[in-house]
Amino acid sequence: MKLLFVSDSFKGSLTSIQTVHLLTKAACEVFDQPDCSGVAVADGGEGTTDAVISATGGEKVYVKVKGPLFEEETVYYGKLPGNRAVLEMAAASGLPLLPERERNPLNTTSYGTGQMIKDALDHGFSDISIAIGGSATNDGGIGAMIALGARFLDEQGNTLKGTGRDLVHISAIDLSNLDTRLKKTKITIMSDVTNPLCGPHGATYTFGGQKGGTPEILSVLEQGMQNYRNIIRKKFGIDPDELEGGGAAGGLGTALRVFLNGEMESGIDTVLDLIGFDERLKGVDFVVTGEGRTDWQSCFGKVLQGIGERCLKYGIPVVALSGSLGKGAEQVFEHGVCSIMTTVNAPMSLKEAMNNAEQLYYSSAVRMFRFIRTGMVLGEQSSVKETSIS
């Protein structure tokens, strides 16, 4: 029996690789010499770089950049086989880098993300995948573009710094010094956010509040975004409000698509392609996946949906082992997942479940595999009876 384990991390308790080790141990307890393999995975958000590095035998490339408030940060991105690189915007420009009292999207910048891209160019990468979840910014991506050589000018011709506050002051965009290597570089944007740049469902009003934006701040930012959008419309003939995902990462989605000709792709599908998931499915009898919590959101670009749909394509059964279930969890059954089991074995608090995550996961994995083995035995007995009758 050949088994493949590919689970998302359980944030705050278990890494993706830990689940592989625990599932392997549990499978070996239940089955006779199973052929087990596993690979780390993520959906294009937090942990994507580490998952892809682990799965592909890649390397970490460290670089010093400016954080969301222009502070010094040391971050890393992934060097992958085939002259490819993978990086997370959140590493340089992410919300977790700021204490709550310092979160204000008027002041934050994506400049450090642009520095990461530039460093990847300096290392000769011509295929760069960028996960853009978890940003602390609402600067339209202008900070990142400035780091790559672009200039955003006010009415007096002064070069703007590249924060959310600057959007309303943009009068002209100058790309004459944009890094020319970008023309020969494939940019893949990993995001499942479909929001436009402006409007009630745009970058500012959908995500700005969680980045520290008060109603007054959001009003200023939205005026800035509209100004930015109008200039892009006039200069490039592109309407960011018609770009699916233009509002992702505080508008970085727009900058990457308009200025760098980036292609927006599903985060989980991009990760699965980067780790060669389809190739790993060859000869596999069934797959175990999972995540910390499964609910209706799991069907919108998350790991369970991505794994389930790939396996369904090849007729391989998938079972999920998740920390908990929420409203709409059963919707994943429409995406190739055959069954879901949870790790909790009694009423308990979230804190208790996380503190005992490893033991709970292992014991539930054993129960899951025993249940699967029972189904296999019943199938064999049914086959024997049919043969005897015939």
Image: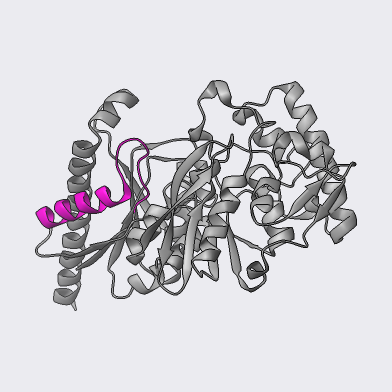
Q: Quadrant of the C terminus?
A: bottom left
* Residue 375 image point, x, y percent: 22, 57
Q: Main secondary structure of the magenta part?
A: helix
Nearer to me, 137 or 65: 65
Q: Is residue 328 visible?
A: no
Which of the 4 quarters of the picture holds residue 225? top right
Residue 277 placement, left or right of 232: left
What residue lies at 78% left-to-right and 52% top-to-bottom? 240
Image position of 371 with respect to 181: above or below: above
Q: Magenta segment, which residues?
A: 7-30
User: Residue 21 in magenta?
Assistant: yes
* Residue 273 image point, x, y percent: 46, 67
Q: How many marks?
A: 0
What residue lies at 62% left-to-right and 48% top-to-bottom? 193
Nearer to me, 125 or 215: 125
Image position of 74 with respect to 312: above or below: above
* Residue 201 image point, x, y percent: 73, 39
Residue 315 placement, left or right of 24: right
* Residue 326 image point, x, y percent: 45, 35
Nearer to me, 383 or 204: 204
Nearer to me, 261 or 76: 76
What residue lies at 28% left-to-right and 75% top-to-bottom? 283
What residue lies at 18% left-to-right and 57% top-to-bottom? 373
Q: Is residue 258 visible?
A: yes
User: Residue 266 in magenta?
Assistant: no
**Colouring:** one colour
Q: Quadrant of the N terminus?
A: bottom left
